[in-house]
Image: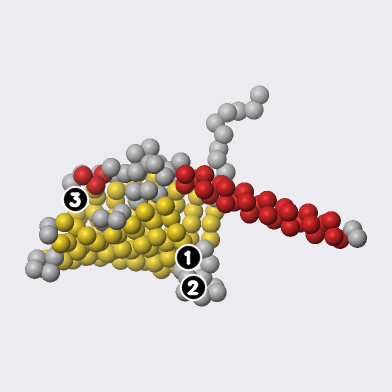
């Protein structure tokens, strides 16, 4: 009879910890959900070792420590392919070991990401990272083989429905720091 209350306490503690983790992660994203980045109207600067343009196909290839800067958004990789249609960039494919993405939103909060392969769907503001994907916002770190991140709304999805059992999403969430000192 003594084991039954202990088991109930263990499960209720587990449920409480699970609820707390979900609450903390939702709070971490909810404050940033309205914190969009308005750099899409800024000029794009590209620095690369080599460039090949296929104008009729709307594709340009950049190799050699490529870095793309647009306002407070930076994309870098070993090679980057830019797809355009009607003189507008539609998709950016970034490869590296790792490739990286960073952005500072309108509330001056930095988001950093890295993966071996990234695709940035420009019109949808969606960055899809595969192979050793890592996304960091503030002190919180998310790791998975696949992460999709909406750079405008700060919505992130990690994991893959076809994932093998050893492919897990790993999350490190730090509690919000209180700026007040104890009296």
Residue 98 can be seen in this image:
no
- Circle 3 packing at 10 Å, graded few (<14), some (14-19), many (20+), is few
Q: Is residue 35 left or right of residue 121?
A: right
> Quick check: 43 left or right of 1?
left
The residue that label 2 is drawn on is 163
Q: Which residue is mark 1?
A: 159
Task: Give the percent coordinates (x, y) of residue 145.
Answer: 45, 67
Name the quadrant of the C terminus. Answer: top right
Q: Residue at x 47, y 47 (%)?
A: 29
Asked if the residue at tag 2 contacts the one at tag 1, i.e. Cβ–Cβ closer than 8 Å, the answer is yes
Q: Can the viewer see residue 143 in this picture?
A: yes
Q: Using the image as rendered, state which of residue 132 and residue 66 is in the foreground.
A: 132
Residue 107 point in image, percent of width and height: 38, 37
Q: Position of residue 8 (x, y in %)?
A: 79, 57
Q: Residue at x 24, y 50 (%)?
A: 69
Q: Tell me which corner region of the image, top left, top right, bottom left or bottom right, holds residue 108.
A: top left
Q: Earlier in the sequence, mark 3 or mark 2?
A: 3
SS of the residue under disc 1: loop
Distance, label 3 to label 2, CA atoms, is 37 Å
Front in this rendered view, residue 79 or 127: 127
Q: Which mark is residue 119?
A: none
Q: Position of residue 172 (x, y in %)?
A: 54, 53
Give the Cα distance between marks 3 and 1.
32 Å
Q: Of the numbered discs in the image, which one, if any, rests on residue 45?
A: 3
- Residue mark closest to the camera, 3 vs 2: 2
Label located before the other in sequence (3 or 1): 3
């Amino acid at each position: 009879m003594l084991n039954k209350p202990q088991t109930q306490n263990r499960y209720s503690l587990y449920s409480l910890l699970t609820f707390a983790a979900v609450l903390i992660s939702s709070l971490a994203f909810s404050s940033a959900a309205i914190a969009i980045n308005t750099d899409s109207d800024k000029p794009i600067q590209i620095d690369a070792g080599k460039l090949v343009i296929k104008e009729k196909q709307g594709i340009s290839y950049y190799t050699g420590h490529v870095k793309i800067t647009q306002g407070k958004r930076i994309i870098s990789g070993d090679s980057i392919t830019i797809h355009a249609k009607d003189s507008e960039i539609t998709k950016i494919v970034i490869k590296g070991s790792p490739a990286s993405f960073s952005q500072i939103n309108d509330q001056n909060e930095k988001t950093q990401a890295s993966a071996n392969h990234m695709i940035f769907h420009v019109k949808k503001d969606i960055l899809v990272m595969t192979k050793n994907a890592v996304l960091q916002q503030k002190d919180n770190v998310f790791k998975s083989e696949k992460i999709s991140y909406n750079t405008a709304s700060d919505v992130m999805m990690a994991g893959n429905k076809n994932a093998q059992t050893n492919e897990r999403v790993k999350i490190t969430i730090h509690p919000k720091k209180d700026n007040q000192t104890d009296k």
